[in-house]
Each structure stands twice: as structure tokens, then as C-alpha cells.
């Protein structure tokens, strides 16, 4: 069973990026998240980390996650007021100049299902993984139905069986 509400601390320095990637790997491995969801989560978390490096430039981040198997919430704190303000602004692709920072905020808004401002200094990146689990459920249900249908046909075909 997955241990929810795990927290990790990371120094807000570029060298911590590998640790951030390992954190995302851990979440996705524990929750059996496929490559598409993994890519969205990894890009979002690393992009957000890079934006924090640009704006805050020092300190320690606490990153935690929790899941109810319908969604994964990745909470990051502390987040400075400038970053919170930028997240609250809606970004349209036509209005993005060739600024890497604006592209980062745009990517963050498009790769997550929701960005939630928890406190004045905490942000949660929310990813809906229910479709993933529903797909697994449907696949397993179909396999089970096929199994029982095949078993039923085998029983009827035995010698001296009647319909």
C-alpha cells in the first residue's frame, strides 16, 4: 500500500533537480502511473522548481504528496508572493513573449489539472489520475469476463453435455 502524505526537503539550488526527479519517480512508481501522466507530473514539478529558483533563489523547499487514487496532490512550500501572484494570472498562448519564464508558467497551467493556492505560501499541483485507474479497472473487468465466458464454453463442450 502507498504511504500517503510523505514529505521531503530540498535545497533550492539547481543541483537538487535530480532529487526532485527522483521524488517524481517515487510517486509514479508507487502509484503505477503510466508514461503520459509521468511526463506531465515530471515536467510540471521540475518547471515549477526552476521558476522558484529564478524567483526565490535560496532556501529549503518542503514538497509533499498525497493521493486518494483519483488525484495526486503535490504540495510545495514555501512559495514567495511573486510566484503566487503570477500563478493567479491567466496566461494565453498568444500573449506569451519569447520569455522562458512566461513559457514556464504557461506550461505549468497546461500540464496540471489544477493549481491550488493552499496558503499564502503553499501551492498544490493537482493531477487527475482517475482515468488511469478506471482504465486499469475496465481492462481487468474485461479479462475476468472473458475468462468466465471461456470457462463456460469449455464446460458445455465436454462429452455427454447437453445445452
Image (cartoon, rainbow, N blue to C red):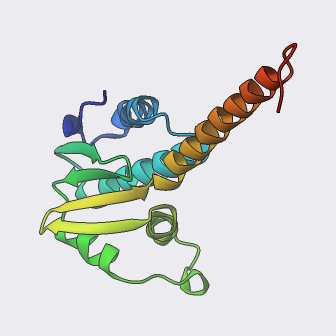
Residue sitting nearer the eye, 120 or 36? 36
The single residue placed furthest to the left in the displayed view is 120
- How many circles with numbers are drawn on the protein? 0
Q: Does the image show residue 51?
A: no
Compared across the picture, whether 49 is left or right of 9 comes to right
Quarter-wise, where is residue 2 in the image? top left
Q: Please state, as top left, top right, bottom left or bottom right, where the N terminus lies in the image.
A: top left
Compared across the picture, whether 151 is left or right of 161 comes to left
Residue at (83% x, 27% y) in the render = 162
Image spot of residue 43 (x, y percent): 50, 50
Q: Is residue 5 above or below residue 152?
A: below
Residue at (55% x, 80% y) in the render = 96
Image spot of residue 94 (x, y percent): 61, 86
Residue at (17% x, 65% y) in the render = 118
Q: Is residue 32 above or below residue 61?
A: above
Q: Please state, as top left, top right, bottom left or bottom right, where the C terminus lies in the image.
A: top right
Image spot of residue 107 (x, y percent): 51, 65
Image spot of residue 144 (x, y percent): 63, 33
Compared across the picture, whether 79 is left or right of 143 comes to left
Quarter-wise, where is residue 90 in the image? bottom left
The single residue placed furthest to the top in the displayed view is 159
Residue at (27% x, 68% y) in the render = 116
Q: Is residue 95 above or below residue 42?
A: below
Q: Does the image show residue 151?
A: yes
Q: Is residue 160 above or below residue 102?
A: above
Residue sitting nearer the eye, 153 or 37? 153
Amino acid at each position: 500500500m502507498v504511504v500517503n502524505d510523505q514529505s521531503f526537503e530540498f535545497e533550492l539550488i539547481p543541483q537538487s533537480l535530480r532529487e526532485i526527479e527522483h521524488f517524481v519517480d517515487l510517486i509514479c512508481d508507487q502509484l503505477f502511473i503510466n508514461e503520459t501522466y509521468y511526463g506531465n507530473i515530471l515536467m510540471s514539478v521540475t518547471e515549477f522548481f526552476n521558476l522558484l529558483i529564478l524567483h526565490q533563489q535560496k532556501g529549503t523547499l518542503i514538497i509533499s504528496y498525497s493521493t486518494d487514487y483519483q488525484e495526486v496532490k503535490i504540495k510545495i512550500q514555501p512559495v514567495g508572493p511573486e510566484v503566487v501572484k503570477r500563478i493567479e494570472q491567466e496566461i494565453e498562448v498568444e500573449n506569451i513573449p519569447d520569455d522562458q519564464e512566461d513559457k514556464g508558467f504557461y506550461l505549468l497551467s497546461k500540464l496540471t489539472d489544477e493549481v491550488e493556492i493552499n496558503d499564502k505560501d503553499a501551492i498544490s499541483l493537482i493531477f487527475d489520475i482517475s482515468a488511469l485507474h478506471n482504465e486499469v479497472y475496465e481492462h481487468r473487468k474485461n479479462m475476468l469476463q472473458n475468462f468466465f465466458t471461456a470457462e463456460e464454453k469449455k464446460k458445455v463442450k465436454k462429452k455427454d453435455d447437453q445445452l
